Amino acid sequence: MRPIRIGIIGYGKIAEDQHVPSIRNNGRFELAATVSRQGKGAPGIRSFASHHEMLDQMEDLEAVAICTPPSVRYDIARDCIEAGLHILLEKPPGVTLAEVEHLACLAAGREISLFTTWHAQHNPAVTAAAERLAGQSIASMEIVWHEDVRKWHPGQQWIWEPGGFGVFDPGINALSIAARIFPGELFVREAELIFPENKQAPIAARLRFASSSSGGELSADFNWNHQGKEEWNFHIRLSDGTELKLIEGGSRLFVGDELQASGGHGEYPSIYAEFVDLIDERRSHVDIRPLRLVADAYLSGRRSTAPPFEDG
Amino acid sequence: MRPIRIGIIGYGKIAEDQHVPSIRNNGRFELAATVSRQGKGAPGIRSFASHHEMLDQMEDLEAVAICTPPSVRYDIARDCIEAGLHILLEKPPGVTLAEVEHLACLAAGREISLFTTWHAQHNPAVTAAAERLAGQSIASMEIVWHEDVRKWHPGQQWIWEPGGFGVFDPGINALSIAARIFPGELFVREAELIFPENKQAPIAARLRFASSSSGGELSADFNWNHQGKEEWNFHIRLSDGTELKLIEGGSRLFVGDELQASGGHGEYPSIYAEFVDLIDERRSHVDIRPLRLVADAYLSGRRSTAPPFEDG
């Protein structure tokens, strides 16, 4: 079987660290091209300065992974859908909901596969957690997502601009796990968004959820100004008293004190394995819920102001 | 044919001024009950302090119109769907998108009709504008929605609270018209949201849209601190040079200098006429787009601060 020739648009750190090795280690794909406005690229692979150039010159391309900052993804994805390519979108799939929903319609119209990926959902213990929680009654869920933006996004400015998501850039990973594992629909009931005086995106957020399937305390605490070791943890109590801890960003699941075995390929290899299935079956997988929860936090949230934040 | 027995939940100004007369003038409905926490109600009609009491005691109720502030609509609507009632929601249908989408699922599951109304879409000239614009190429669209909050919401506090919408309370009427008449999907591309220093909701907003069907300037300017006569206007230029003006909140359409004839029953009579059709045909009409545009403005928008706003 001929491999699926794929291009990467937006050749930054995540493309280099995650997408390239996952594509190279998946025999069904062949990395055929990369696009970078800065002229970066993978050794030995054709590199272009714009997706237009790539689409013009690479006639046998079949798929693209779009890893640019979110604000430009819609226009690029639309061009690629029109060119008949299958699309993998890094998280978040766009800045606005209407754009993502429209891409889903366009993809359906062209019968190509659109995959809005949420890499945290592919952590090995997340599937185990979802299986353990299926059909259970949840007494409480506490999400803590604390990290140091200086460590994880040194010098990046777009994350603080309008549409840059701020602390929701990591927080949406937690929300994507919650959407995957929580047995029922989650609604934002209260939110507090804390904006540094000099930034357009929040540095911290606290959310309280409601659910039609649980009357308990459901909360999330996102902090991007955290010193020391990151905390990316879910603590869930079932109505029968069982305690679950999904820690280290979905890497390990404890039920009670017992570490649960969890398999899987790792985040990005799992993403590309699913992308193959979607392409083979001409299906799309569009999960808007994590982005919608962020939107709902903005719609319903209280804003407060924190002191100015200075990088470094 | 036996009339549809309907209750009104949330008996405030809009219920009294619009819903009661529209129900009374539609022979297919019978106003059977009202709910008001403040004990208000229509003369001669059974009145309840909560929707729970009404649902317990009015066993032959078939439909409800929910006119409470948006923050409590989801819980009430869910209870009413579970009781098997058809639901009409005042605008906006909820504070968060996830809640509204979930109500749509619940309604589909119970096979009742859910109608998320946007009263401005029922203005007589809006249908005429939609028909005139269908299939046209749009060169530009300028929306101006300026009114004085002191005149239209005297003393109302919830509009300034988190989830209270602020200037998007009237602005969403404009967005609902835009969603109805614009021939193509609209996306928020840039937004500026202006918050009074002492309020949790914006007093002004400026939006710039993109559309897959138009490369022209598409904008909206919402101002709630406007002195003098309100301006609720669309100014649309087609690529062939034709100018359309839809003015007075969708009441009158000019094509060039010529006033177009426009029929229709008026906003709320038209809403109740459609509700009858939906119930008769066991269909729902859920239009999430105006609320999604507001969410997208928050997701992508720049915030700035205005001086404190004091009522009166």
Image (spheres, coloured by chain):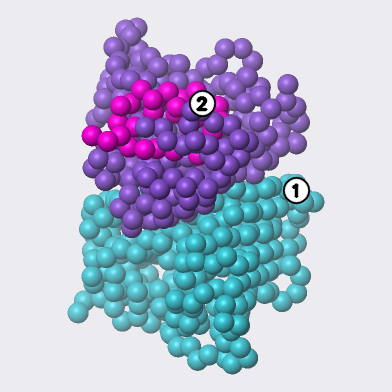
Chain colours: A cyan, B purple
Give amino acid for label 2.
Pro
The residue at the far left in this view is A1
Residue bearing mark 1: A305
**Residue A111 x/y as whole percent:** 22, 58
Residue at image point 57% right, 56% down: A188
Alpha carbons under labels 2 and 1: distance apart = 48 Å
Magenta residues, start to end: B1-29
Please say if A84 is above or below B179: below
Is residue A67 something that shows in the picture?
A: no
Number of numbered discs present?
A: 2
Residue at image point 53% right, 90% down: A260
Q: Quadrant of residue B37?
A: top right
Residue depth check, mark 2 versus mark 1: number of the one nearer the observer:
2
Give amino acid for label 1.
Thr
Crowding at dot 2, Cα within 10 Å, few <14 / some 14-19 / many 20+, comes out as few
Chain containing the residue with disc 2: B
**Residue A147 x/y as whole percent:** 68, 69
